Image: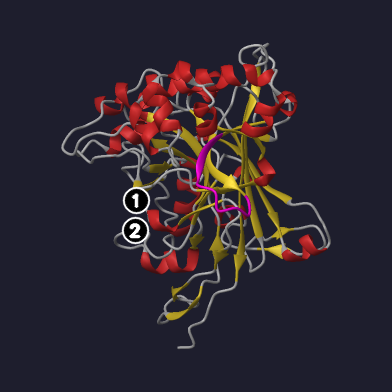
């Protein structure tokens, strides 16, 4: 853990999400104003205005290209500069926020101008997301779901050979705190009967981690597995909301469509790959009897970190009683079967061109225990084992008024705790068009 002292006292809280070693990026403006959107770096309970810091000369050591990118309203220009520039920007920001390393520590008026309480900020999706892809990288999740619908063959033959994914909908990605409207869709309430059209009855969340692509590749080219990790800019929490009854009816033969296109919630602060380096895992867990990887997916040092992921649920009745959110599951990314660099390399293996700001998610993160299952479909086993909540309520799936909260953090002896903040959303009732 660094001995440097941050200019923000709250950043020294060992249980906090945003110490000096983290400094995640976000796009924000002061709440209730029409100020232009700017980039910020979170530290403790404050956030540093990066554009204003450039104008004050605090980030000159990052170089002219970085400074220009840090004055942008979104992260795409910085993402496009590549990993060397990301490191330079991060070092400059850390220096500016370290006591004795810049005048920010001794100039109270400058601190007042450049540091904003995070609670006073309105945040938005931090990058222009051109495309969104969701993978299926938890073997426990894939096996659990497969056993529900294909008990004779829970895991399909291709699963251990390549990372499975589908193309999601970038236009419906929303930021933490955005309400989510229950979707309509075709559903089959009774197996073997014709479908009806109505509100989803089996609304679910999915606990995921996603990464933003930094430098992309030209169409028709591939990214080698050795070059994949340096192209990953940083990570956010992802809740891939899912209408399970719609999904069950529509997913064959082409996979998810309307069941997942209505909303995907992400956390607002992008935790950089560099901040997570102390928590990097040496290998991805594969069984001794698993098939060998094809060479384009072989990676001697996979980009996968040990990050704890948590899901909490708070019903409308719980909020009215001021009851704290109830923990639903606690898992870890160490249980993922495929690493993030393998996802990126496989995604480009056909010559698909990724671009700065594209979002790629892990799929539901689930473990071997019931308590580590990362969605309600698994946690309640298709609703057959409802969760019991404080106050006597039960949940098989998500109901109107429920708030789903995702949290994540990396923590290890000798390293500062790196947190992700929250990724939350309250479910609103379906909106009937009257026909």
Q: Kindly indicate the quadrant of the structure image that contains residue 409.
A: top right
* Residue 150, position as x, y percentages in the image: 42, 56
**Residue 325 tag number:** none
Helix, strand or loop at label 1? It is strand
Looking at the rendered image, the disc whose residue lies closer to the viewer, 1 or 2, is 1
Callout 2: SS:
loop
Please report contact status of discs 1 and 2: CB closer than 8 Å, yes or no.
yes
| Residue 36 falls within the magenta-colored stretch | yes
Counting from the top left corner in percent of width and height, residue 115 is at 65, 33
Q: Nearer the viewer, residue 100 or 316?
A: 100
Vertical order, 250 against 100 (above or below): below
152 lies left or right of 297? right
Task: Give the prevailing secondary structure in the magenta stretch.
Answer: loop
Closest to the observer: 64 or 77?
64
Q: Kindly identify which residue carries mark 1.
A: 166
Q: Nearer the viewer, residue 253 or 53?
A: 53
307 w.r.t. 89: above or below: below
**Residue drawn at the location 45% of the way across and 63% of the way down:** 262
Q: Is residue 406 visible?
A: yes
Q: Is residue 171 left or right of residue 19?
A: left
The residue pinned by badge 2 equals 255
- Where are the magenta residues, as a range? 31-40
Measuring from the top left, give residue 314's x and y in whole percent.
71, 57
- The foreground one among 120 and 230 is 120
Point out the residue furthest to the bottom here. 435
Is the residue 402 above or below the residue 170 in the image?
A: below
Who comes first in sequence, dot 1 or dot 2?
A: 1
Left/right of residue 216 with respect to residue 16 in the rendered view: left
**Total marks in image:** 2
Quarter occupied by the N terminus: top right
Image height of 246 relative to 378, above or below:
below
């Amino acid at each position: 853990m660094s001995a440097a002292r941050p200019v923000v006292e709250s950043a020294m809280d060992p249980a906090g999400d945003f110490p000096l070693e983290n400094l995640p990026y976000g796009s924000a403006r002061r709440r209730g104003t029409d100020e232009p959107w700017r980039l910020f770096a979170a530290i403790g309970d404050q956030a540093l205005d990066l554009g204003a810091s450039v104008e004050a000369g605090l980030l000159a050591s990052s170089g002219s290209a970085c400074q220009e990118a840090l004055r942008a309203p979104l992260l795409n220009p910085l993402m496009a500069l590549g990993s060397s520039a990301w490191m330079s920007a991060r070092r400059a920001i850390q220096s500016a926020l370290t006591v004795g390393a810049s005048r920010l520590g001794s100039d109270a008026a400058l601190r007042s101008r450049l540091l904003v309480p995070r609670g006073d900020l309105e945040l938005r999706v931090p990058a222009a997301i051109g495309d969104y892809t969701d993978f299926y990288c938890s073997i426990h999740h894939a096996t659990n779901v497969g056993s529900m619908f294909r008990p004779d063959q829970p895991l399909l033959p291709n699963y251990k050979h390549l990372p499975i994914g589908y193309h999601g909908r970038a236009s419906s990605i929303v930021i933490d705190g955005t309400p989510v409207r229950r979707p309509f869709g075709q559903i089959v309430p009774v197996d073997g009967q014709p479908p009806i059209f109505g509100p989803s009855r089996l609304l679910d969340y999915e606990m995921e981690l996603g990464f933003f692509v930094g430098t992309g590749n030209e169409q028709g080219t591939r990214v080698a597995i050795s070059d994949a990790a340096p192209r990953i800019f940083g990570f956010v929490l992802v809740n891939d909301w899912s209408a399970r009854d719609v999904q069950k009816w529509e997913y064959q033969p082409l996979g998810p469509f309307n069941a997942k296109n209505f909303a995907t919630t992400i956390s607002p602060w992008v935790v950089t790959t560099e901040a997570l380096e102390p928590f990097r895992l040496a290998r991805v867990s594969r069984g001794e009897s698993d098939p060998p990887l094809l060479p384009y997916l072989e990676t001697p040092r996979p980009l996968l970190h040990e990050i704890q992921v948590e899901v909490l649920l708070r019903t409308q009745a719980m909020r009215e009683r001021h009851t704290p959110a109830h923990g639903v599951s606690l898992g870890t990314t160490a249980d993922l079967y495929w690493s993030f660099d393998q996802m990126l390399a496989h995604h480009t293996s056909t010559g698909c061109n990724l671009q700065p700001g594209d979002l790629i998610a892990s799929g539901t993160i689930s473990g071997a225990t019931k308590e580590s299952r990362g969605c309600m479909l698994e946690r309640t086993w298709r609703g057959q084992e409802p969760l019991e909540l404080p106050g006597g309520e039960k949940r098989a799936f998500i109901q109107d008024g429920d708030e789903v909260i995702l949290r994540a953090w990396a923590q290890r002896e000798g390293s500062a705790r790196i947190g992700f903040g929250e990724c939350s959303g309250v479910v609103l009732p379906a909106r009937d068009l009257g026909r």
